[in-house]
Amino acid sequence: MTRHVIRLDSPAPSFIDSYLLGDGRLGAALRGLPGTEEMDLNLDTLWSGGPGEHGVGPEDAGARTRDGDGPPADAGAPGAALLTEIRTAIAGGDLARAEELARRNQSGRWTQAYQPVGRLRWTYATGADGSAYARELDLRDGVARTTHDGVTVETFVSAPAGVLVSRATGPVTGAGAVAGTARPAAAAVLDTPHPVRTTTTTDGADRVWTVVTGRAPVTCLPDYVGHDEPVTYADDKPDADGSVAAGMGFAVVAVTETVPGGVRLVVAGATGFRGWDRRPGADVENLAQVARDRVGAALARRTEDLLAEHVADRRRLVDRVELDLSASGDDAAAHERAFDLGRHLLVSSSRPGTQAANLQGIWNADARPAWSGNYTTNINLEMAYWPVELLDLAELHTPLLGLVRDLAVAGTGTARRYYGARGAAVHHNTDLWRFTEPVDGEPQWAAWPSALWWLARHLVEHVDFAGQGAERTARTVGAVAVLRAGAAFALDMLVDDGTGALVVSPSTSPEHRFVLDGGAQVAVGAGAAMDQELAREVLTSYLALAGDDPGEATLAAEVRVALPRLREVAVGRAGDLLEWADERRPAEPGHRHVSHLYGAFPGSRITATREPDLLEAVRRALALRLANGSGYTGWSQAWILCLAARLRDTALAEHSIDVLLRTLTSASGLDLHPHEDWPEGQVFQIDGNLGVVAGMVELLVQSHDGAVSLLPALPDRWPTGRLTGVRARGGHQVDVRWSGGRLDAATVTAGDGPLVLEVPERRGPAVVVSEGAVVPTTAVVPAAPGCSRLTFPAQPGAVYSLTFASR
């Protein structure tokens, strides 16, 4: 089986079976139809709405929002009084009342929605019947190919050129070199849900220009909100600077032309987005000129040159890490392909200067996409970036890190209005405009203001993977501002639980409820496990990175007092780590979220050496969840895989990968979320595709527990293979090679020393060599069960090879 390639023998019947291409800004979902290709186009900044911290509500679409929705923007801090009532109800055990009050402390509004550009139809071969059909996606080079009827179509989206290029060669329409004529190729046609103006012109005898301009919606209600007019547009004139309050302009330019041996399509687009806190532009003629210039520059170059530049750009990123399981059989080859697909989607949807990948990356075909195609911050957004540092792609992390820094600013008003608190609060949804308020909805998901604490972890990881030196210093500066906002808010969300311990109040476990004695289901309480872990983590990270700064002395002193008082997560009678502060009956024992296990993954507080008893409690809690059916969405199963890696449970890891690939991915390998109201019954979500990559790396290399651990959870079905180029905390770069299920050798390029390596004990005594000389090592305890640890004073940049002495 060819490596790095997905190959199918039929066109995509729906969006979820498309091949996805992109450069972080321009996305295309290709159906691979013979003769007339259809591709759904997207631009990463094309969203409904405009700047402002209050999102979209029913009144924006002509209906009045419900009474009692959250504190008004100009009322100081009215949420503080309501917060006091909620906390009083919780402390008094009246959790039904707390739930009711929490519902009142919501905004009554939602995020705006990620928008499609439209579906582009390009006829390149009239009369094609699709004989000898095949399509493939090259995951290394980011090129889609379709062959049929003697025609070959090759498509890519070039980040250096900023355009999509598709070339058809063979017996194609308008190909003078083949058909013996000079007639131009058929014009590309864009079907879009937005009101647009389309012009088509010819340029000489063999080139057709199609220019489409329009505006995004002013409002777009979520797909689950019923309304007679859920999507609305404006026709107001732009101001002198070309800006409007909402409903940004956009333009798409598509050119078809004959080229030697075939026909070619070149596409570019532009939007009026100017910044999350700035009025967008709606001067569509200016936007069209931006797109024309990009297309014109590409038309002046041969396809071969554009393709070579694109491939070189891709390989500069993709080739940093390689997982090779080709010697381990077909199952392992399918697993390797899932790894390659996830990396392809990451490189295609997140580049420096772009927006962060949303629920579907940068791909979406619907004006009202599932869950608005937004950023869901109670797992999905974070999961999409779990593998980025591991894959040595730190620069691809920057779109998310920029979003988090923006939210730390945008969320200050939300913290003040809804909680009377310092710092910044971010709830479970955000969008291009950095929405931070609690949405209109059930408290089980809406009443969760802890997202910034979780998101701050990504800035900390960005620091940890840098090692030492100027790069680490620069990354630290960027992290501290966010950690300061998160820590200040965390301090104001902590209350004494009556025993002297501090708990987050109010607190929910994302999207899950528990059952009261009378049968009522509620979500609001105090001290849910995830919130306790997040609060501890953000406070600890703040002290680690900013605690010695004299400018941080006052806040740091508060943190030092609070940290020792944080209540530990609870363990139940069955030895399982509890989701809430005490034993409660879960509304869904098999709930898809495993939020209470955060401390084991993605957190790193609960490990085999630091908290072995709690790690066992995590194992039992996960087993209970699984026994009741958890993992029925792709992203949920990816989280389970990552937990299996941390638990070193190889059987569970293999099972998770199997479930993902056999039941929760489309024919083209896209991660799926069951959605009974959606036409296909399932929705593509990128998080599972990317989460599985992180899980696969963690099976082979881990670095969260004070050591670089080699092959901590090698699956039985991966008996032979190698992983090269992965990053570890401390800035180390690691290669591992194994056969017969045993580690053969490893190479570590040191970041900042000393270096601690953890190796499987059953392999025999480890020998470390650098520049041909054996390096003296010292044993370290404790180590994970079945492993041993050794350390040595590594020099930054030096290469150390680990082998094993024969017994």
Image (tube, rainbow, N blue to C red):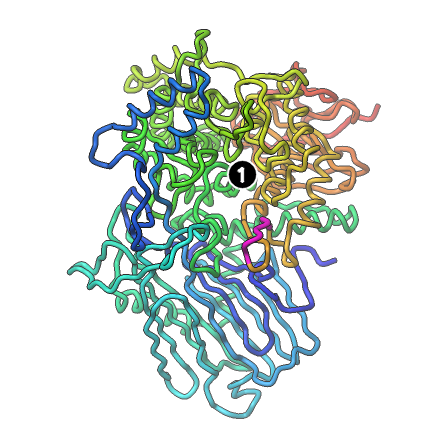
Does 736 sit above or below residue 553? below
**SS class of the residue under badge 1?**
loop
80 and 424: which one is in front? 80
- Dividing the picture into quadrants, the one containing residue 413 is top left
- Dividing the picture into quadrants, the one containing residue 703 is top right
Q: Can residue 93 be seen?
A: yes
570 and 484: which one is in front? 570
Q: Residue 369 location, x and y as percent?
A: 46, 55
Q: Residue at x 57, y 87 (%)?
A: 178
Q: Is residue 676 magenta?
A: yes
* 569 sits left or right of 197 in the view: right
Q: Can residue 771 be seen?
A: no
Q: Residue at x 46, y 50 (%)?
A: 224
- Dividing the picture into quadrants, the one containing residue 149 is bottom right
Q: Residue 332 location, x and y as percent?
A: 74, 47
Residue beneath disc 1? 386
What residue occupies the far bottom of the structure in this picture?
A: 180
Q: Residue 374 location, x and y as percent?
A: 43, 48
Which image quarter is the N terminus in? bottom right
Residue type beneath disc 1? Trp
What residue occupies the far top of the structure in this picture?
A: 499
* 657 sits left or right of 671 in the view: right
Magenta stretch, residue numbers: 672-678
* 320 sits left or right of 403 in the view: right
Q: Is residue 286 magenta?
A: no
Q: Residue 687 location, x and y as percent?
A: 54, 45
184 and 614: which one is in front? 614
Q: Residue at x 52, y 29 (%)?
A: 520
Label 1 crowd bin: few (<14), some (14–19), many (20+), radius 10 Å: many
Which image quarter is the C terminus in? top right
* 241 sits left or right of 803 in the view: left
